Image (cartoon, rainbow, N blue to C red):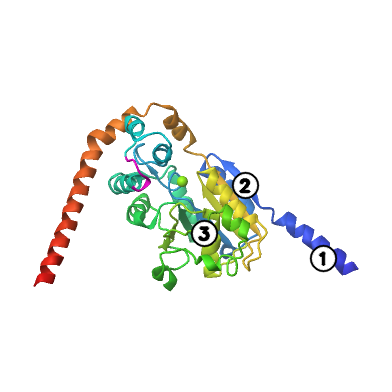
Amino acid sequence: MIFRVLGFLFFFLSLVASASQQFDIKSIDQFEQIFVELTTNYKSDEILVVMDIDNTLVTMDGELGSDQWWNWQEAMVLGSEGDDYKQRHGAVALSFDGLLSVQGFLYDVLPMHAPEPKTIELIRRLQDDGVMVIGLTSRGPEFKSPAFRELYKAGYNLLRTASPIEERDYLSMMPYNVRELQSKYGFTLRQIADYKLNKPRPAVYRDGVFFTSGQHKGALLKIWMQDRQLSPKVVIFMDDQVKNTNRVWEAFTAQYGGELFVPEVNTFRYGFLDKRVEAFNEISKQDVIQLWERVYRPVFEQQLNIMKRNLTDEVYNFEAAVDF
Ligand SMILES: [Mg+2]
C-alpha cells in the first residue's frame, strides 16, 4: 500500500515537474528568460530546440515575398473569385503552383535579415552549451538553397549541433510511409485524418533544417524524431504562426500509442513582427503590387523564357542525338 501511495505521489510530482506550457512572446529576451527557467533542471543533451525559419530566424527586408505577402497572395489564389478579380487585385499568379514558382524566384533574388540580431547570439550560445538546435520550416525542399544562403549570411549555422543527416535523408523525398503511420509512429486514425497525413508531399532534412512543404509541423517533427530515435526530455518550439505552435502542441501532448514519449513540450508563439505583419495586412497593397509589376515581373518572365528555351534546346539536342 505504501508503495502504491508513493507511486501516486511520484506520478503527481512528475506531472507538476514536467508541466508543458504554451507561451505567447514579443521578443527573444522574453524567450530566453522563460527558456532558462524551464530548463534549469535539464542537462544540455536532454533539450531539443526547434526553430521556425521565416519571420522567426530571418525575415524579408521588404514586404514582397515575405510571409505576410505569401498569406495574402495564397488566400487570393485559392479564393473562389474569378481570374479577372484576382488579376485586378494584384495576384501574381492564378494557380497555387504558379504562386510557388513566383515565391521561389523571390526567395532567390531578395535579401533577408534576422528580425532580432540577439537571436543569432542566443542560438550560438545554446550550441556552445551542446543543446541540439534544428530548423523546422513550411518551405518545400525546392527552396533549400536561398534559405541556407540567408541563414548563413545572417550568422546562423544550424549544422553545429543538429542531428546528422542519415542515409534515409538522401534516399527518400517522402517524409514517411503512409502504411507505417499507425504501426511505427503511433498515430491514431483520427490524427491521420485531422493532420491530413494520407497524402505526404516531398520533405527533406538537410544540414539542420527540415523542409516540410506546408505539412503538419507537429506530426512531421514527431516522425523525424522517431526515425532518429531521439528522446529528449523537453522539446522547445518557436514559430511566429499560432497555427504551427498549436500543431506542435497538439501532436506532442496527444495520447500516443507510439514508443516515442517526450515528457515535456513548450511552444513559443513569437510576436516580434506582429506590428509589421498587421500593418501590411491593413494597408492598400499598391506599393508591393507596383514593385512586382515594374521591377520583378519582367525579370521573372525573362527567366521563365530562358528556361523554356533551354528545355526546347534539350529536346532538340536529344532528338539530334537519337538521330545520330
Ligand atoms: Mg514563420
Q: Mark 1, residues whose alpha carbon is within 10 Å: few (<14), some, or many (≥20)?
A: few
Residue type of the residue flagged with mark 1: Gly
Q: Nearer the viewer, residue 108 or 6?
A: 108
In the rendered structure, are the residues bearing label 3 and label 1 in contact, judged by CB atoms less than 8 Å apart? no
What mark, if any, has residue 22 been given in the picture?
2
Tell me which label, 2 or 1, sits earlier in the chain: 1
- Return the x and y of residue 237 as percentages of the image width and height: 55, 52
Residue 103: quarter of image = top left
Q: Label 1, on which residue?
A: 7
In the rendered structure, are the residues bearing label 2 and label 1 in contact, judged by CB atoms less than 8 Å apart? no
Which numbered disc, 3 or 1, marks the residue closer to the eye?
3
- Return the x and y of residue 251 as percentages of the image width and height: 60, 55
Q: Secondary structure at mark 3?
A: loop
Q: Label 3, on which residue?
A: 198
Q: Magenta span covers which residues?
A: 93-97
Q: Is residue 166 visible?
A: no
Q: How many labels were placed on the picture?
A: 3
Is 193 covered by the magenta stretch? no
